[in-house]
Every structure is written in structure tokens, then in C-alpha cells.
Image: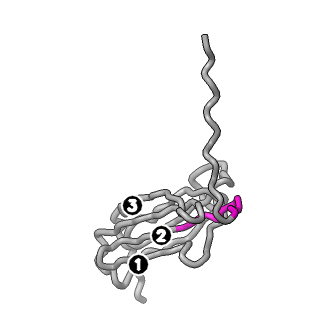
Amino acid sequence: TNIPQPRVRIGRPGYEVSKSRDPVTNQRSLTFDLHYPELDDAYQRQPRHRFMSAYEQRVEHPPNRNYQYLLVACEPYETVAFKIPNEPIDKGDGRFVTNWDGEEKRFTLTLYFVDTVPQQEGSVIPPPPPPPPLPVE
């Protein structure tokens, strides 16, 4: 019998998360950039991702249904989880993109949230109201 040996974990990958908005649709987006510098077989192995509901996770109790988790795993690195708003994700063309660069050993995932307030053509979101005046003494 050939029993697979457990692999030694080598820690967390380096990561960077950036928030932005689409200049045309004003949709909020998140970009996750993870770096796996110690990966020795980057062309045969690539990170995988999945979404986890607040009720599946066992770290935060009680679960907060306002959030979901994006998990990214790539052996032998530790799996990392990002807590993101529990809002619908736009799976339209160019709205949910993953990329694995085997040479740089970088995994990039960009997602857009569905715009919950439909924008009319050419409309601009008004600025927030000014702060209330300070009391005069």
C-alpha cells in the first residue's frame, strides 16, 4: 500500500487586498493578490478558491450572517480566509476573474459585488450631505 505522507506546511502566503470601484458602473470590487514564493512545482500546482458561509466557519461565534469568507488554498501553504461582505457577487463577463502566474507564483482574484442600487444611464451618485453645523457657544 502506498500511503501519502502528510506535507509539511510552510506558512501563510504573502497577500495584498485592494478595494476599488468600477469607474463606469460604480460597482465595488475587491482584488486579492497572493504570492507563493516557496512553491516548487508552480506549473503543476495552482491555488484553488471557494466561498464559505458564516455558518460553515468555526472561528467566530456566533456567526455573523452579514459576512462570508473567501478561502484560498495551495499546498503546502496554509489556507487563508478573507472575511468579505455577504452580498451577491457579479459573475458576469469580466466581473469575476482569477489568474495564476506560474512564473511569478502569484494568484490574483478580482470580484465585483452586484450593484444593489440600480444606476440609471449617465447618473452620478450624489455626494454625502454636509456635516451638521457645530454649536456656537
Query: How busy is the neighbourhood of tag 2: few (under 14 within 10 Å), some, or many (20 plus)?
Result: some
Amino acid under label 3?
Tyr
**118 falls in the magenta region:** yes
Q: Residue furthest bottom?
A: 1
Task: State the image coordinates of residue 46 (x, y, percent, origin top left).
Answer: 41, 78
In the rendered view, tell whether residue 16 sits above or below residue 44. above
The residue at which mark 1 appears reads as: 46
Which is closer to the viewer, label 1 or label 2?
2
Q: Earlier in the sequence, mark 1 or mark 3?
A: 3
Q: Residue at x 54, y 76 (%)?
A: 94
Which of 61 and 115 lies nearest the eye of the viewer? 115
Residue in view at x 39 percent, y 81 percent: 45
Q: Amino acid at mark 1?
A: Gln
Q: Secondary structure at mark 2?
A: strand
30 is within the stretch colored magenta: no
Q: How is the image coloured?
A: one colour
**Magenta stretch prevailing secondary structure:** loop
Q: Which residues are magenta?
A: 111-120
The residue at which mark 3 appears reads as: 15
For the residue marked with disc 2, what is the amino acid? Leu
Quarter assignment of residue 26: bottom right
From mark 1 to mark 3, how far is it between C-alphas? Answer: 15 Å
Judging from the image, what secondary structure is the residue with disc 1 in? loop
Residue placed at 70% from the left, 63% from the top? Answer: 120
Label 1 or label 3, whichever lies nearer to me, is 3
Q: Which mark is residue 109?
A: 2
